Image (cartoon, rainbow, N blue to C red):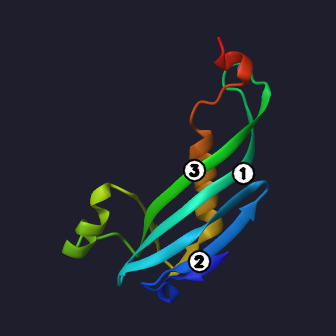
Amino acid sequence: MEIAFKKVSKEGLDFSLARNKINFFGKIYQKSPTLALLEGKLEGELEHRCDRCAEDICLIVDEQVEMLISDGVYKTTKIDKQISQDTLAIVEIYDGLINFDGILQSEIESYKSDYHYCAICESQ
Ligand SMILES: [Zn+2]
């Protein structure tokens, strides 16, 4: 799923997509001519392996996702500085298209990169 950066308005644009058992949905707002704020949610189940014993586990995902999307290389202008003061992650796009599948993929990867244990290991 891709949305042209130019289509994103100040009022916000809804998005929703799914990958396996994970849903990713929310809204994206134009904050400046080259900066948009994505506010979304990652919800569902993720198959994973326990980081200690490698047992298959199912992670219940319920995560808020907030990031800035920069149309082109991110330059800190005065306005952008005010918007990005919360030290949000910034995703740069170079073809004018926001690739939600790519964002979802990297969110899943970063979620998985945390340590996750099965119930047995967690209770030890
Ligand atoms: Zn385990």
* Element type at mark 1: strand
Residue appearing at x 62%, y 60% in the figure = 104
Q: Which disc is residue 63 wearing? A: 3
Which picture quadrant has residue 16?
bottom right
Total residue callouts: 3
Q: Amino acid at mark 3?
A: Glu
State the residue position of label 1. 44
Q: Is residue 51 above or below residue 20?
A: above
- Mark 3 surroundings: few (<14), some (14-19) or many (≥20) residues within 10 A: some
For the residues marked 3 and 1, what is the alpha-carbon distance in whole angstroms? 9 Å
Q: Which disc is residue 14 wearing? A: 2
* Element type at mark 3: strand
For the residues marked 3 and 2, what is the alpha-carbon distance in whole angstroms? 17 Å
Residue 80: percent from the left, percent from the top? 27, 71
Q: Amino acid at mark 1?
A: Gly
Q: Which disc is residue 55 wearing? A: none
Q: Is residue 48 above or below residue 26?
A: above
Q: Is residue 90 above or below residue 47?
A: below
Query: Is residue 12 or residue 68 the one in the foreground?
Result: 12
Q: Is residue 109 above or below residue 123?
A: below
Give the quadrant of the N terminus: bottom right
